[in-house]
Image (spheres, helix red, strand yellow):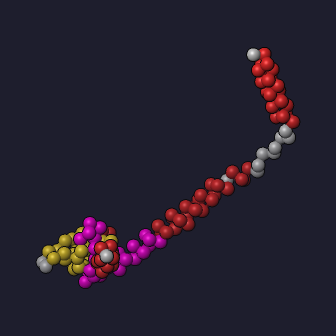
Amino acid sequence: MLRFRGFFITIFASLSAFAQEAPAASPPPAWTSLVPIVAMLVFMYFFMMRPHAKRLKQRQEFVSALKRGDQVVTGSGILGRIEGVTDEFVTLEIADGVRVKMLKNQVVGSASKAIGNAKEARA
């Protein structure tokens, strides 16, 4: 038992001596702690915020360019032809003689693109 105690005392004494002999490292400059944060912000801007703003602008241009006779699809998946357009509302004809008045922002795309995408998905 005394042998083991002496062994541990020797180990701890040498470790403490080693720790005392090591030169003190100087701390890194303060600006280096900001580098990861700046890198994350740049990443978020180029891969999240900028593409979202681009899609939002395209959507606003699409909605503002809607006119009578366009074939469109709504957010709920209803296909129809625009019969009337105001600043906030569109009137869609979804079947012969069946017209629905809905918010202009609920129109999400053109019907030809939606039908083409559906055909590609089935193939």
Whether residue 88 appears in this view of the structure is no
Q: Position of residue 117 (x, y in %)?
A: 33, 75
Q: Position of residue 48 (x, y in %)?
A: 51, 63
The answer to whether residue 19 is above or below residue 84 is above
Q: Position of residue 4 (x, y in %)?
A: 76, 20
Q: Position of residue 40 (x, y in %)?
A: 59, 58
Using the image as rendered, state which of residue 51 and residue 24 is in the foreground.
24
Quarter location, residue 43: bottom right
Left or right of residue 86, residue 50 in this image: right
Whether residue 12 appears in this view of the structure is yes
The answer to whether residue 110 is above or below residue 28 is below
Quadrant of the image containing the N terminus: top right
Q: Going 17% across and 74% down the picture, which residue do you hit?
A: 99
Q: Is residue 22 magenta?
A: no
Q: Going 79% across and 19% down the picture, which residue do you hit?
A: 3
Using the image as rendered, state which of residue 104 and residue 70 is in the foreground.
70
Quarter location, residue 79: bottom left
Q: Going 64% across and 55% down the picture, which residue do you hit?
A: 36
Q: What residue range appears in magenta? A: 54-78
Left or right of residue 119, residue 12 in this image: right
